[in-house]
Amino acid sequence: MFHMFILFCLCCWSLTGVFGDSVSVMEGDSVTLYTDLTEIHEDNDILWKYGAETSLIAEISRAAGIFSTYNGTDGRFRDRLKLDNQTGSLTITNITIEHTGVYQLEISGSKLTTKTFNVSVYARLPVPVFSRDCSSSSSSSSSSSNCSLVCSAVNVGHVTLSWYKGNSLLSSISVSDLSISLSLPLEVEYQDKNTYSCVLNNPISNQTQHLDITHLCHTCAVSVSLIVPISAGSLLILAAVGMIWICRKCRKTVQEVQTREDEITYAEPMFYKRNAQKSKTEEENDVVYAPVITRR
Ligand SMILES: *[C@@H]1O[C@H](CO)[C@@H](O)[C@H](O)[C@H]1NC(C)=O
Ligand SMILES: *[C@@H]1O[C@H](CO)[C@@H](O)[C@H](O)[C@H]1NC(C)=O
Ligand SMILES: *[C@@H]1O[C@H](CO)[C@@H](O)[C@H](O)[C@H]1NC(C)=O
Ligand SMILES: *[C@@H]1O[C@H](CO)[C@@H](O)[C@H](O)[C@H]1NC(C)=O
Ligand SMILES: *[C@@H]1O[C@H](CO)[C@@H](O)[C@H](O)[C@H]1NC(C)=O
Ligand SMILES: *[C@@H]1O[C@H](CO)[C@@H](O)[C@H](O)[C@H]1NC(C)=O
């Protein structure tokens, strides 16, 4: 009973205590911050402020006839705010990561009431992808009946990536940074009949990919077993073709060098003629360039 009470108090404290209301929302969704008023009295002035600089983003003053939303200092709230004219509650539509932060509500009237909302916006998660790690299994392919896999997620932040066998957690990796790539390996036997899944989650959502061992481990196993005999046979053929090609190339380059030498001797008189009017240094340059021009 006492424990329950402590737990209850802790919940209250974390929800409405020094940090204010905690609101978690997914990128692209809308979130409403409630004033808890049922109606706005004539003498109520309502101010909504955002961030450390507490910039005014919305205000209602019935006495002054003001009912407005603002874009915020850097325009990040442009076209995204909706004020409820009955309750003064503020709705942020199509929210993005940059709307994360503390929102402050001030209701002035007979007395001043303030309320803060700590809004956390989480990115939409991609579905994690599997890839077969062929490199590590081929090194011990003949003796091992194992299949090495990697589950990965790119461009994620504030997430955990985990491997589950049935409902039990096998391994996991967490990242608090923004926008990095995560990957987590797993080794299973080809004959394993358990269900494996890879889960990517943040505090408010998750994405799961279920592993199909026969499908995923099949692809690499086939390519590994095919490559070995093919490469052994084709290596000989390749070597033979390569040697023939090299011999041809050798003969060809010898011929080319010979013809090029012929061309150079032909070209020389022409360039000497042209260089007659030029300085000595330019003449040397022209001689160096001559073979390039005659080759075209
Ligand atoms: C807002 O909430 C987040 C996550 O719940 C927490 O990490 C952060 O410290 C809070 N910020 C403030 C100013 O309360
Ligand atoms: C806010 O943005 C709107 C367009 O959405 C623009 O017309 C208006 O001038 C902006 N107001 C301020 C104060 O920047
Ligand atoms: C609130 O706004 C709606 C339209 O959005 C209007 O019909 C209604 O009269 C307004 N109510 C008050 C109390 O201003
Ligand atoms: C939501 O915001 C994003 C980023 O500002 C924008 O690209 C998208 O078009 C918006 N979607 C809607 C439905 O307004
Ligand atoms: C194969 O994987 C299992 C776990 O799935 C592991 O216990 C075993 O040692 C692995 N065998 C080899 C040869 O790597
Ligand atoms: C994933 O989210 C669903 C609800 O969307 C929840 O039922 C499930 O337990 C979550 N799974 C994990 C592993 O967090």
Image (cartoon, grey):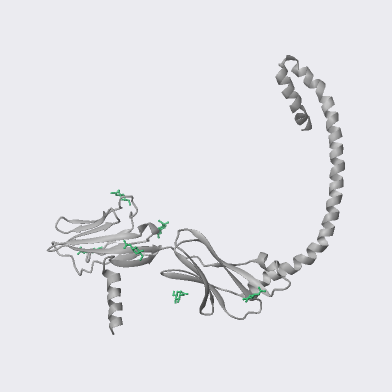
Position of 199 with respect to 150 (left or right) is left
Position of 137 with respect to 209 (left or right) is right
The residue that appears at 78% across and 21% down in the rendered structure is: 271
Which quadrant: the N terminus?
bottom left
Q: Residue furthest front?
A: 2
Q: Would you place residue 230 above or below residue 10 in this image?
A: above
The residue that appears at 28% across and 60% down in the rendered structure is: 103
Comparing 265 with 81, the one in front is 265
Q: Name the quadrant containing residue 257.
A: top right
- Total numbered labels placed on residues in the image: 0
The residue that appears at 79% across and 66% down in the rendered structure is: 229
Horizontal and vertical percent for residue 236? 84, 59
Which quadrant: the C terminus?
top right
The residue that appears at 71% across and 19% down in the rendered structure is: 281
Horizontal and vertical percent for residue 19? 29, 65
Q: Would you place residue 217 above or below residue 73 in this image?
A: below
Q: Residue furthest top?
A: 277
Task: Evaluate whether residue 124 shows in this view.
Answer: no
Q: Name the quadrant containing residue 217.
A: bottom right
Horizontal and vertical percent for residue 40? 18, 65
